[in-house]
Amino acid sequence: MTLTHEQSEIHASKRSALAIVDCDVHPYPRSLDEIRQHLAQPWRDRYRGGGRGFFGNPVHGSRLDSTPPNGGPPGSDPSFMRKQLIDEYGVAHAVLLPRAFCNLHPDPDFGSAIAGAFNSWLADTWLGEYNHDGVFKGSITVNHQDPQAAAREIDRWAGHPHFVQVMTDSGARAPFGQRMYYPIYEACERNGLPLAIHPGTDGMGINIQPSPGYPTHYIEWHTCLSLSFQAHLVSLITEGVFERFPGFKVVLVEGGVSWLAPLMWRLDAEWKALRSEVPWVKKSPSEYLIDHVRLTSQPLERPERNTHLINLLEAMDAEHILMFSSDYPHWDFDSPTHAFPRLPREQRERIFSRNAFEFYGIG
Amino acid sequence: MTLTHEQSEIHASKRSALAIVDCDVHPYPRSLDEIRQHLAQPWRDRYRGGGRGFFGNPVHGSRLDSTPPNGGPPGSDPSFMRKQLIDEYGVAHAVLLPRAFCNLHPDPDFGSAIAGAFNSWLADTWLGEYNHDGVFKGSITVNHQDPQAAAREIDRWAGHPHFVQVMTDSGARAPFGQRMYYPIYEACERNGLPLAIHPGTDGMGINIQPSPGYPTHYIEWHTCLSLSFQAHLVSLITEGVFERFPGFKVVLVEGGVSWLAPLMWRLDAEWKALRSEVPWVKKSPSEYLIDHVRLTSQPLERPERNTHLINLLEAMDAEHILMFSSDYPHWDFDSPTHAFPRLPREQRERIFSRNAFEFYGIG
């Protein structure tokens, strides 16, 4: 086997212990019963899982080779994930984001119950019995449709050694800068946990579709998920959330990368002209990013010419803002060895490792 | 007066007759009565103008120096516009986009009547008696909420020597790739007129707000207008509109610039994996741009480092895709002499002049 330069570098760095942190990995229950056993009645009888509605990937939702040989859906077998992801690429930590789809329920109690059940399940399994070496780090799923309940759920798990963040879906009924969400941000801040926002329930259930009307196809819906993230980020900044909660931090997961700098150029210019409308925004919008915001890398855009991407990575200060993610086991998995063009060593080390260690306070 | 290098170049190019085309200029009626006289009853009595609702610029909507000295609102005096824009910068043609706000009415007949009245008014005034030298080119306003009526309105004006495009607002109830709009695109194609999409009624009246819920402030709403354009463009491409109407062309006006390349990188990657879902998309999405899509430049994003913008202009093939616009007389006016960083001469000539001449078939 002939290794490319990139691969050689990875293999070399494995030996020299570059501790890759993969910030978007999806563990799945082997069956819905694994979740049901953590649900009280009446939810236990009512829970049917799913909830994605009509926008599922029409080709395949996961890597074709990710189905565990011993059965169960992709992402449900820790041993197989260790083989295919952790050992294969020398991953030091995988940050797990379960897909509870709790944020689309009309009934906030049902949504919060599902969130709680996924947390109990994750704590017992991937963060418990499957986690002898601490490689797995977890996310506290919350139902942002009931912010007070979400805050209680955060307090319930805070202090657990392996939950490193709170997570919710980008699908919403109001942009995330708005004040009904603040109990969640208070709870994140007081417990020192970043909030990860992950795509998944946009336009589903009770959530607004963040487009000028419903998209028609999955490719359209999926491409435009990045627009939802942009709207949430603009909302968080212009509402002054990071001034109100100086310790609050956000991770934008799987929302795209290359849009960040152009959006901030636009917003910074708007702020210069319009800051009297939002006097609580004390500094140029882009200046909030370094202290409060990280993006995960997958799906990393790859233009024909690497210089076009590398220039944008520089413009967004990717060296400090970006954190590697693979999205294992999903169909658009980004390999640690192939997703990125060649980067300077310092930048590479920060993106693949140090940024996540620092932002999550791991280890 | 000391001229910067850029200014010197502009002044030199004025002398050497670089024929600037300004692709986004807003003429206003002196009063609502100018529109009313083109409205039949019952609309004449009912017309109240406006319709922007709560999202008006809270600071100032137009350049403070753009109010005509002889009275009337900014943009309503052709002589003053000639002085302040046409003569000041040596503009060969100003493409006029009136602001009819007709696309937010619940009643499609009222909306279409307003569109028709603005067209009659524009033809009589700015494209008629004020246009002795043909400097003004116009846009046929249509009410896209009634596509059949819009198509009739296009046919009504097609062939007029100074209408060079059709225009509508980005505010909508469905993304623009969807098939209810096709009568408009057929009419554009058969008359050889591009469709300009301009911000203005997003989230207003009957239109959906293309965000995850309503934004709170004008700065948020205005910043996120570019997201609406991105969603429309993704819809147009993934629905196969440019395959169905091979002669149909679109101008994205005032929707931002720097997002284009990153969005196309994302969409091209999605298409590689998902093209079986949209088999009518025959080639990579970004390949449709050169034949079908142009962007106007204002408000041009200006990062701290010019190289970051110049790299993105190269990545989006701005030399062929971008057309200069100023948005005169609005508050965020882009000056022909100051909006852009220094560009290579050929690129500059295409963006400021030739691209528009060719795309609109002027002269």
Image (cartoon, coloured by chain):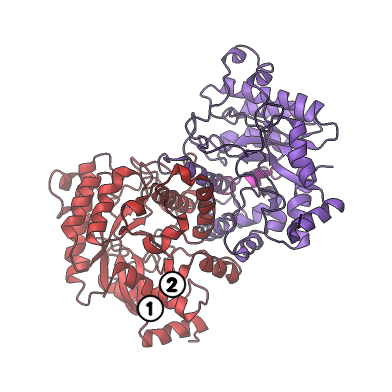
Chain colours: A purple, B red
Q: Amino acid at mark 1?
A: Tyr
* Residue picked out by circle 1: B89
| Residue placed most toward the observer, B325 or B335 | B325
Q: Chain of mark 1?
A: B
Q: Quadrant of the N terminus of chain A?
A: bottom right
Q: Secondary structure at mark 1?
A: helix
- Give the magenta range: A234-251
Dot 1 and dot 2 residues touching (CB under 8 Å):
yes
Q: Amino acid at mark 2?
A: Ser
Q: Is residue A262 magenta?
A: no
Q: Chain of mark 2?
A: B
In the rendering, at what x and y percent does residue B180 appear?
Answer: 29, 43
| Residue placed most toward the observer, A312 or B204 | A312
Residue at position x 64%, y 63% in the image: A310
In the rendering, at what x and y percent does residue A273 appear?
Answer: 50, 60
Q: Quadrant of the C terminus of chain A?
A: top right
